[in-house]
Image (spheres, rainbow, N blue to C red):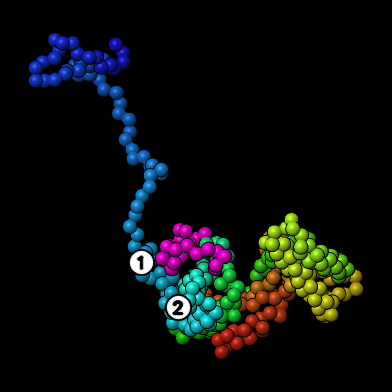
């Protein structure tokens, strides 16, 4: 027979005390032993359907010299009282306990140090990034919480950044012996099709006012729930306010030297009135802001940041030096 097979032994093949004997039929090598087939490779297969319970030491997520540990220490040495005063939850009173402001501050500073400015991106990284996991002790903080904290504490965060610069200055990490300055275009949250001239903007304003009045007249409509009615009214009111800011910005531009020249129509965005159409690094044009960054050349620490709607960097150097002096008490050497 050409194939291997196992046959059940007959009664004569069974010997007392030896159990069953298997008779193997198949090709026989020259030595008289059966020729075995080639063995298949043996490898360890991965089973991703299994559930594992693991012991995790949070302190070992990052090494002792990791930057996130230094940031945590810095936030413990600055005055954060301005972040704690608005908290309504107090000992002995009911209410949900908010996240520690020191933790939220440290998360934002660590994110900024890595060039991350999006709360949604931070929320995503907290699921697997060791630095964020160490800071939050494996807790995941919703991106809405991070965003709301930054919006509600903007002035306090600005003051904190100045304090951090002071600490870097005291530790000789920021020398101000030599600084470099440049501008970069950052796209605004507006589209090119949102720009309107004065005439069209006036039409949009009138339509927005009529819409708000129409929604107020539907206050007693039984087919609308209170929640839906409130959302519609809020959206209409926000649009009216944006159009109002756009009208004010348009009027300012029309009275500013260099704008509103004969043959040129001034337009502003109804979404982000302060944005301007600027040339991008890829050669295209888009509504943008011109962010001015001043950096200490020794350690690459950003010493000051400014935002302008001017398309050109010309004339931005001296205001940048004034910002450095205002925040650090001295001008660069």
Q: Is residue 328 left or right of residue 318?
A: left
Q: Residue furthest right?
A: 262
Q: Residue at x 71, y 77 (%)?
A: 314
Q: CA distance from mark 2 to mark 1?
A: 29 Å
Q: Residue at x 29, y 23 (%)?
A: 37
The residue wearing badge 1 is: 59
Work out whether residue 79 or residue 316 is closer to the camera in this orientation and state it.
79
Q: Which residues are magenta?
A: 124-146
Is residue 196 in view from this perspective? no
Q: Is residue 154 left or right of residue 193?
A: left
Q: Quadrant of the N terminus?
A: top left
Residue 128 shown in magenta: yes
Q: Secondary structure at mark 2?
A: loop
Q: Residues within 10 Å of mark 1 (few under 14, many from 20)?
A: few
Q: Position of residue 21 (x, y in %)?
A: 17, 18
The residue wearing badge 2 is: 91
User: Are discs 2 and 1 less than 8 Å apart at CB?
Assistant: no
- Position of residue 292 relative to residue 19, above or below, is below
Q: Residue at x 58, y 70 (%)?
A: 148
Q: Position of residue 91 (x, y in %)?
A: 45, 78
Q: Residues within 10 Å of mark 2 (few under 14, many from 20)?
A: few
Q: Secondary structure at mark 1?
A: helix
Q: Earlier in the sequence, mark 2 or mark 1?
A: 1
Q: Position of residue 73 (x, y in %)?
A: 42, 77
Q: Residue furthest bottom?
A: 329
Of marks 2 and 1, the one in the foreground: 2
- Position of residue 202 relative to residue 8, above or below, is below
């Amino acid at each position: 027979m050409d194939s291997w097979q196992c046959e059940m032994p007959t009664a004569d093949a069974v010997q007392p005390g030896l159990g069953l004997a298997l008779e193997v039929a198949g090709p026989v090598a020259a030595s008289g032993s059966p020729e075995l087939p080639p063995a298949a490779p043996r490898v360890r297969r991965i089973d991703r359907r299994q559930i594992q319970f693991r012991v995790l030491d949070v302190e070992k997520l990052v090494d002792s010299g990791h930057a996130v540990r230094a940031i945590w220490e810095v936030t413990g040495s600055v005055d954060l009282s301005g972040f704690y005063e608005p908290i309504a939850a107090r000992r002995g009173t009911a209410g949900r306990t908010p996240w520690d402001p020191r933790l939220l501050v440290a998360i934002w500073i660590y994110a900024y140090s890595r060039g991350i400015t999006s709360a949604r991106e931070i929320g995503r990284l907290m699921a697997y990034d060791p630095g964020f996991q160490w800071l939050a002790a494996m807790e995941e903080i919703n991106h809405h919480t991070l965003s709301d904290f930054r919006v509600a504490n903007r002035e306090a965060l600005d003051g904190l950044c100045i304090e951090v610069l002071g600490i870097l200055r005291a530790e000789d990490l920021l020398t101000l012996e030599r600084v470099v300055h440049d501008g970069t275009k950052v796209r605004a949250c507006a589209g090119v099709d949102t720009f309107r001239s004065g005439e069209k903007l006036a039409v949009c304003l009138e339509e927005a006012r009529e819409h708000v009045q129409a929604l107020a007249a539907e206050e007693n409509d039984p087919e609308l729930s209170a929640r839906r009615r409130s959302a519609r009214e809020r959206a209409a009111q926000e649009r009216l306010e944006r159009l109002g800011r756009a009208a004010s910005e348009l009027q300012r531009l029309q009275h500013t030297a260099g704008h509103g020249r004969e043959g040129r129509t001034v337009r502003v965005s109804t979404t982000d009135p302060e944005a301007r159409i600027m040339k991008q690094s890829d050669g295209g044009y888009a509504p943008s802001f011109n962010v001015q960054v001043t950096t200490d050349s020794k350690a690459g620490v950003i010493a000051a940041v400014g935002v302008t709607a001017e398309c050109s960097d010309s004339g931005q150097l001296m205001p940048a030096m004034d910002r450095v002096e205002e925040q650090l008490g001295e001008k660069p050497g």
